[in-house]
Each structure stands twice: as structure tokens, then as C-alpha cells.
Amino acid sequence: MNHRKLGTSGLHLSEIAYGNWITHGAQVDNDTAHACVHAALDVGITTFDTADVYSDTKAEMVLGQALKGVHRADIELCTKVCHPTGTGRNARGLSRKHIMEACHASLNRLQTDYIDIYYAHRFDATVSLEETFLAFSDLVRQGKVLYVGISEWTADQIAEGAILARELKVPLVASQPQYSMLWRVMEAEVVPACVREGIGQVVWSPLAQGILSGKYLPGQPMPEGSRASTAAGSPFMNKLAGQWLRTEVLEAITQLSSMASEVGLTLPQLAIAWVLQNPQVSSAIIGASKPEQVIENAKAAGIRLDREVMMQIDRVLEGLVERDPSKTG
Ligand code: NDP
């Protein structure tokens, strides 16, 4: 496993990170979750990503248990705050009260004394940025948070946050946007704003939630046990299905599968290697419902794709790629 520097910070992340959204505490049982985490450690993944809101806070607990006994300094443990974690009026958002309480709750669930990267999961327009960044600053001074990140903020929001981060000496060094061959929304505005501020990209859903694994075939039923079949009917899956589980997208992906085998890769490996060709990407966070997926996908680390392969991918996906920066968030 290769490691990359996160933006201009001194922190190194594994090129491929492991995340537990949807899986831990929900789609997969705890034994499988632990097996995935151990497969990740075995292939050299050191960066782990979760959020307080995943599986109603259960995902952090499962990850904390699975990482028990691992030397803390050998891993980077990252989590997020903003989405509701309770019914109380203050159990959400980026107020000082919620950030402080959410951080303490995450530390307990993760069974750790500090978080390596603490992300604002979304922008909160109802709270002043001064209040939010002062809370982050205090957590950093207390040693409970080492670095701060934002997720799915627009370029303007990032620029505004960066001014306060500088004033309050908050190490704002990470941005966590969605990024894949199919979803390139971060490229036009978020990445240039981050480059100006020395912020690196830790990107999510490099397989477009498994669509870019090639297992969803045009005109065929969804594979049993797959994310699209287990979450079928949920609002987020309806959105995903409308966007990508369409014949024209799935036919293009079938062509990409053949291209991948021509260069000696599986399609998941090609898709993850594709996001890692972008030098602004510090790490790609993969999800997995089985340890075998972690082992297969981790082989994408360190792969260089020829210019011709990159151009061929663009030709196959012409007209199917989302690039509109207004889709951020
Ligand atoms: P991916 O795009 O990597 O999708 C992962 C899913 O694809 C797996 O759970 C599995 O689903 C399927 N899959 C993976 N590998 C293979 C394979 N080799 N063959 C076949 N199927 C495969 O990432 P996720 O969407 O899971 O997101 C990754 C992480 O990003 C999350 O865990 C979270 O940490 C972070 N994230 C952050 C967000 C944010 O707002 N900041 C939002 C969403 C995610 P299955 O087997 O069930 O079909």
C-alpha cells in the first residue's frame, strides 16, 4: 500500500482508505465487519473513515471494536459531525454545543482518545462559521482532534472557512467529496479552491457505490445481496437507481469491464486506480460488504494508467459523466 501526503499537511494517509457507511451496524453482521477491517489492515490500509450518523451511531461502535488492539499510532481514524444523531434540537448541525458533545460521543464509541481527521459532514447555514471553527479550534487545542476537514462544501464555503481556519490556527487540511469516473463534480471548483488553501481530497464512493464493479448488468436482475438490491426502495437508492442503474450507463460499464481486463485489471481496480490518477486525491475511501472485496480493490494502489486508457474511458463514458459543480453537497 502506498501512502500520500494530505494536502500540504504533514499527515500521510493510505492511498486507499476503508469506510463503513451502510455496511457496519446495518448491511453486514459484526463478524463480517471485523473480517473486512482485518483484511484492510492486512493489505496495508491505515486510514479508516466513519461518521457518527452511520447506522444510527452503531458504525462507529463496530469500527472501534474491530480496531481494538491495533497500535493507535499506526492508523488514521477519521469521523464526522453534522447530521442528526438524536431527536433533540441540539443533536445536529455545527453549533459549538453539538460539535463538543458529538466529538465526545464519537471518542467513546471509537474507544480512542483522539480523532485524526474530524470532518464537518456538511455545511450548516444556520450557524456562524466563527462558532463552528472556534469549537474545532478548542478541540484541536485539547488534543481531541488532530486535523479538521469538510465534506461536500462548495468552493465559496471552503474559501470562507479557510479564512477562519487561518485566524484560529485550525489545521483545515481535508476535503471529502464524492468522486468517481461517473461523478466528477469536485474538479471544476472545489479542487481549485482547495489547492489555494493546501487542502487535500479524500474522496468517497470511487465505485459509485458498487455500480462501477460491473456486477449490475443491463436487462438483468440486481445481484442478490448487492447494495442496490438490499437497499431497494429506500429514497437514496431510488436516486442512485435513477442516476446510474440505467441501460445506457450499464452498457457503457460493460465496455469498461472489457477494457479493464485488457490492461490486466478488474473493473473495481480500474475504477479506483482512475480516481488515484488525480494528484489532488490523497486517498480514495472504499466500502466493502465482504473481505474479498477489500483484498481485490486494494490492488488498485500504485497502478499507473496510460494516457490512452484514460482517454478511452472518457470516450466510453461520454455524455454520462456528471460534472456540474452546483451538485456539490
Ligand atoms: P464504494 O463506491 O467503494 O462502494 C462500495 C460498495 O460497492 C461495497 O459496499 C460493495 O457493495 C460494492 N463493492 C465493492 N467492491 C466490490 C467488488 N470488488 N466487487 C463487487 N462489488 C463491490 O464506496 P461507498 O459508497 O461504500 O463509500 C465508501 C466510504 O466513503 C463510506 O464507507 C464512507 O466512509 C465514505 N462516504 C462519505 C460520504 C460523505 O458524505 N462524506 C458519503 C458516502 C460515503 P455490495 O457488495 O453491497 O453491493
Image: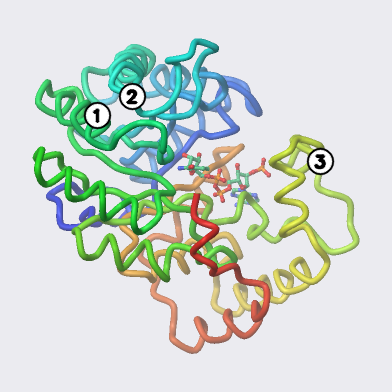
Asked if marks 3 and 1 touch (Cβ < 8 Å), the reply is no
- Please name the amino acid that badge 1 sits on: Glu
Asked if marks 1 and 2 touch (Cβ < 8 Å), the reply is yes
* Dot label at residue 131: 1
Gap in Å between the C-alphas at discs 3 and 1?
46 Å
Gap in Å between the C-alphas at discs 2 and 3?
42 Å
Gap in Å between the C-alphas at discs 1 and 2?
7 Å
- Disc nearer the start of the sequence (1/2): 2
Circle 2 packing at 10 Å, graded few (<14), some (14-19), many (20+), is: many
Q: Is residue 148 left or right of residue 295?
A: left
Q: Which residue is mark 3?
A: 224
- Disc nearer the start of the sequence (3/1): 1
Task: Pick whichever, 265 or 92, lies toward us.
Answer: 92
The image position of residue 265, as x and y in percent, is 55, 68
Please, what secondary structure does the residue beneath circle 1 have?
helix
- Please name the amino acid that badge 2 sits on: Ser
Total residue callouts: 3
Q: Residue at x 90, y 62 (%)?
A: 219
Q: Residue at x 33, y 24 (%)?
A: 95
- Please name the amino acid that badge 3 sits on: Glu
Q: Is residue 79 left or right of residue 300?
A: left
Task: Pick whichever, 85 or 225, lies toward us.
Answer: 85
The image position of residue 183, as x and y in percent, is 56, 63
The image position of residue 239, as x and y in percent, is 72, 48
* Dot label at residue 150: none
Q: Nearer the viewer, mark 2 or mark 3?
A: 2
Q: Is residue 195 left or right of residue 208?
A: left
* Dot label at residue 95: 2
Please, what secondary structure does the residue beneath circle 3 have?
loop
Q: Residue at x 50, y 10 (%)?
A: 88
Q: Is mark 3 within 8 Å of ligand 1?
A: no
Q: Nearer the viewer, mark 3 or mark 1?
A: 1
